Image: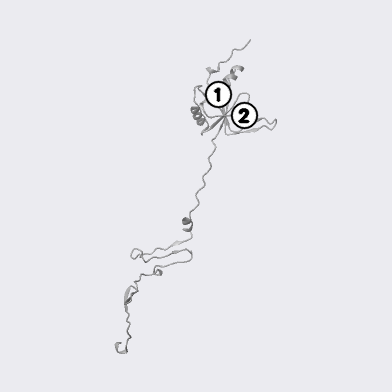
Amino acid sequence: MVSPSINSHNFPLKFLCSYGGKIIPRQTDGKLRYYGGETRVLSVDRSISFAELLLKLGEMSGSSMNLRCQLPNEDLDALISITSDEDLANLIEEYDRVSTIISSSLKIRAFLYPPKSTKKVASPTPSIASTSSTNSTTISNPDATSSPSSFCSTVTSPHASMRHHDCPRPYKKVTRNSLDETINGRICHIRTRSSPVYDDEIS
């Protein structure tokens, strides 16, 4: 008696999904097998799109995943990547064809892999200004607002110090007939003359 054929189009799609493990050869015979991780069954409607399937797979595994599937009668070293609606339709068609031949509904063997991580961008190297700031000390001049010519330098040595009164004080330009100096905040006028000075002129 011949068993009736199964119309797989009347059944929902079932994916046997494995993730979190790796494919390694078996020690006894070297045949590839999936080791570790988790394996779950996901049942979806046959009209599901590839984008909707990826969304459900992500909800099941807890993160976004790439999908690779094993074709019927193929080993684990011949997995195919499913990346579009066309790939998904061809996969379903192949499983339906084999299911009809063996009169049994097959679960689509699926393996989930996280997307390849992008290369990390190297952090920018510190600028010369930021690097030198750790090795120098800037001394500000409290009188900088009163006179543009009154300022203090930048001390590059950690042991060096500079006080406010070490800064150069303002001075006036020397003229031919007079010389103005600022001494301790007082202005002294020194007259100059070209003729000789006699003793009787000195009082």
| Picture quadrant of residue 34 | top right
Give the residue drawn at x 65%, y 30%: 32
The residue most toward the right is 28
Question: What x and y, as percent, mark residue 133?
Answer: 46, 58
Residue 30 picture location, percent across and down: 68, 31
Q: Amino acid at mark 1?
A: Asn
Q: Residues within 10 Å of mark 1 (few under 14, many from 20)?
A: few
Q: Quadrant of the N terminus?
A: top right
**Between 62 and 149, the one nearer to me in the picture:** 149
Residue 137 % position (x, y): 45, 62
Relative to residue 182, is residue 134 depicted above or below? above
In this rendered view, identify the residue nearer to me: 86 or 38. Answer: 86
Residue 203 visible in this rendered orientation of the protein: no
Q: Quadrant of residue 179?
A: bottom left
Q: Residue furthest top?
A: 1
Q: Earlier in the sequence, mark 1 or mark 2?
A: 2
Q: CA distance from mark 1 to mark 2?
A: 16 Å
Q: Is residue 121 left or right of residue 78?
A: left
- Residue contact between numbered discs 1 and 2, judged by CB atoms under 8 Å: no
* Horizontal relation, residue 33 to residue 155: left or right: right
| Residue 29 point in image, percent of width and height | 70, 30
The answer to whether 132 is drawn above or below residue 175 in the figure is above
The residue labelled by disc 2 is 78
Mark 1 lies on residue: 90
Amino acid type, callout 2: Ala
Label tally: 2
Q: Quadrant of the C terminus?
A: bottom left
Q: Residue at x 59, y 17 (%)?
A: 100
Say what secondary structure mark 2 lies in: helix
Q: In the rendered image, is residue 94 in sight?
A: yes
SS at badge 1: helix
